[in-house]
Amino acid sequence: MTGARRTVEVDEVLFRAVYDSPASLPGRHRWVTVEADVRRIEKQLGMPPRTIGAPLWVSGDEPDCPKCGRRVNWLDIVSSALSGVHDRAMIARVILGDRRYVNTEVPAAIAGVYCVDCRTPIDGLRSFKCHNWAYAFEALEGVLARMSGLPAPAIPAD
C-alpha cells in the first residue's frame, strides 16, 4: 500500500469485526507475550506490579530475534517506543484504555523495533494488539497517576 501510515479510532462493533480475533493478525505466526516480559513492561512504564492482566498478542513472519534467539514480543515494542517515539502514559493508555484503534495499512514490518536484550533490529514483526479488559478502565487514571508519582485518585464504590 502506498501513502502515509494512518491509525484511526473506530467504534466497538467495527473493532470486534476486524481486529478482535488473534487469527486476524497478519504474518505466519501469532503468539502471546510471556508473563515475565509483561512484568518487565510494567517496570519500564513505572506501573504497579500486575497492572497488566490482558494477553499482549504479537504476530509476524519471524518470531525470534535473529541474533540472540529470544522470542520477540511487546517488551521489545514498548522498549523501542520509549526511545523517543512515545511516552509512558500514551503506551499505558493503549494497553489499559477503552479506546480501540486499527492501522489502515498492512505493514510489511513494524519499523523501529529492536531486541530489548541484544539491540538487534527486528524486521519480522507485522502487528501487535492487546485484549484489554474492562476491569482496568476505571483504574487507568489511578495507574497513570502512580506512574507519574502522584497519589492515585479515589475510585467511587459501587
Image: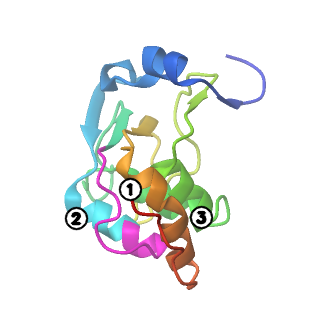
N-term mark: 1 or 2: 2
**66 in relation to 31, above or below:** below
**146 in relation to 156, above or below:** below
Q: Nearer the viewer, residue 46 or 120?
A: 46
Q: Position of residue 60 (x, y in %)?
A: 37, 32
In what element is the residue under mark 2?
Answer: helix
Q: Which residue lies under the disc numbered 1?
A: 158
Residue 50: which disc?
Answer: none
Mark 1–mark 2 Cα distance, whole angstroms, equals: 33 Å
**86 in relation to 145, above or below:** above
Which residue is at 45% across, 14% downward? Answer: 17
- From this viewpoint, is residue 74 visible? yes
Residue 36: which disc?
Answer: 2
Mark 1: which amino acid?
Asp
Residue 89: which disc?
Answer: 3
Magenta part of the chain: 42-55
Quadrant containing the N terminus is top right
Which residue is at 40% across, 65% downward? Answer: 116
Mark 3: which amino acid?
Ala
Q: What kind of secondary structure does the magenta stretch mostly adopt?
A: loop
